[in-house]
Image: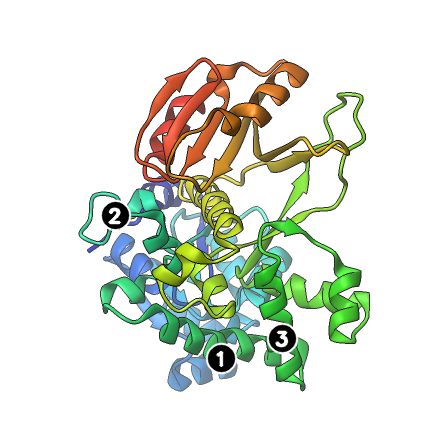
Amino acid sequence: MIIRKIKDSILSTSDKIPVVSVTGPRQSGKTTLTKQVFHDYQYVNLEDPRHREFVLNDPAGFLNVYNSKCIFDEVQQVPDLFSYIQVSVDETGKNGQFVLSGSQNFLLLEKISQSLAGRVAIFRLLPFSIEELIDSEYIGSSFEDHVFKGGYPRIYDQGLDPTQWLSDYIQTYVERDMRTLLKIGDLDRFQFFMRLLAGRNGQLLNLSDLGMQLGVNYHTIQSWISVLEASFIVFKVLPYHGNYNKRLVKTPKLYFYDSGLACALMGIRSKEELQLHYAKGPLFESFIVSEIVKYFANRGISPHLFFWRDSSGHEIDCLIETGSKLIPIEIKAGMTLHSDFFKGLTYFDQLSKTKSSDSILVYGGDEVQHRKEGIVTSWKSLHTVLDEVIR
């Protein structure tokens, strides 16, 4: 069994705050994790009609039965319960009293912000990271293995075909959420929208262009992307606006949390197809940026991630802002190191006065090197280099 890296952060925090919430995409392992971490807690699945009816008819009586050390799964199914949880934790003053989890993160987070602000610690459980897989039987020999398969646990646990499972995942979960939250009637158009987004993975987000291709307005595209963000399907990275006397790009980039999902949407059916695909570079970039997001999420931290690009075409794929330190990261899918790989880092280091010892080049090969231009790391070792640089 893969030990989830986020486990320690959740345990240490649960002793300091009344409620812990575990969010994340559907099928990322939230139920399994909460049962493992809080193995001595009662578990109540509120999708069970019996429990849900109990809450709806008598929320106070329900919490009188399940009043401490309890996991409430799919808690967004009974939104009235949040107010009663608030009253309970305020009255008892106990830490680690309840654990909340749910699949419709949009609704869950909305209710948490309304009723439990200041009383809850929110953790994001994302699909497997390379850091979690590195010492397991599941680690692949090349980055294409993981870019194609993605990180959803069931694919690994059950040895499933990624293409088929991810296609079913899109229809079963993503489209169901879209129907529920946005009342989308034309699912064919929405499917086309998701394929368009996958084709733009790692690129600047142009809402107007997407709207023109789909025949819908700018605001519709905004709302669709907002729900995909709330469902942990995609995320945006904003441009960094350091004052370096340069005209800078002001449009965000869009990435998929799971590269396997993007591959499925693009019709890539094997890692061999991926190796020859025109989008291999952007998909590798998306995979690495997502790994950086997972690195921080697994430590209970919301990272300050950016990219940087000026009007002359100089670019840094990812910037991590942590305290007073700025960490530039270049991402190259090639397996052989070339001097050209360092041009962006060298230019940015000189412009921003960043120390080269804080600069990172992630590539598709296997070596880790400390060079004068920065630290070179394999895709497998990124987490150890981040541990070194982020002190």
Front in this rendered view, residue 352 or 85: 352
Q: What is the secondary structure assignment of the residue under circle 3?
A: helix
Q: Is residue 84 left or right of residue 336?
A: right
Q: What is the secondary structure assignment of the residue under circle 1?
A: helix
Front in this rendered view, residue 67 or 8: 8
Q: Amino acid at mark 2?
A: Ser
**Which quarter of the picture shows residue 11?**
top left
- Structural crowding at the residue carrying mark 2, measured as other residues with C-alpha within 10 Å and reported as few (<14), some (14–19) or many (≥20): few
Is label 2 or label 1 in front?
2
Q: Is residue 289 left or right of residue 10?
A: right
Q: Amino acid at mark 1?
A: Gln
Q: What is the secondary structure assignment of the residue under circle 2?
A: loop
**Which quarter of the picture shows residue 249?**
top right
Q: Which mark is residue 141?
A: 2
- Structural crowding at the residue carrying mark 1, measured as other residues with C-alpha within 10 Å and reported as few (<14), some (14–19) or many (≥20): few
Residue 127, percent from left and from top? 39, 56
Q: Give the distance between the C-alpha atoms of the residues marked 2 and 3, in whole angstroms.
A: 33 Å
Q: Is residue 251 above or below residue 150?
A: above
Q: Is residue 127 above or below residue 142?
A: below
Q: Which mark is residue 301?
A: none
Q: Is residue 49 above or below residue 14?
A: below
Front in this rendered view, residue 221 or 378: 378
Q: Which residue is mark 1?
A: 171
Residue 33, percent from left and from top? 31, 57
Q: Amino acid at mark 3?
A: Phe
Q: Which residue is mark 3?
A: 192
Q: Is residue 24 above or below residue 249?
A: below
Earlier residue among tags 2 and 1: 2
- Structural crowding at the residue carrying mark 3, measured as other residues with C-alpha within 10 Å and reported as few (<14), some (14–19) or many (≥20): some
Q: Give the distance between the C-alpha atoms of the residues marked 2 and 1, in whole angstroms.
A: 30 Å
Earlier residue among tags 3 and 1: 1
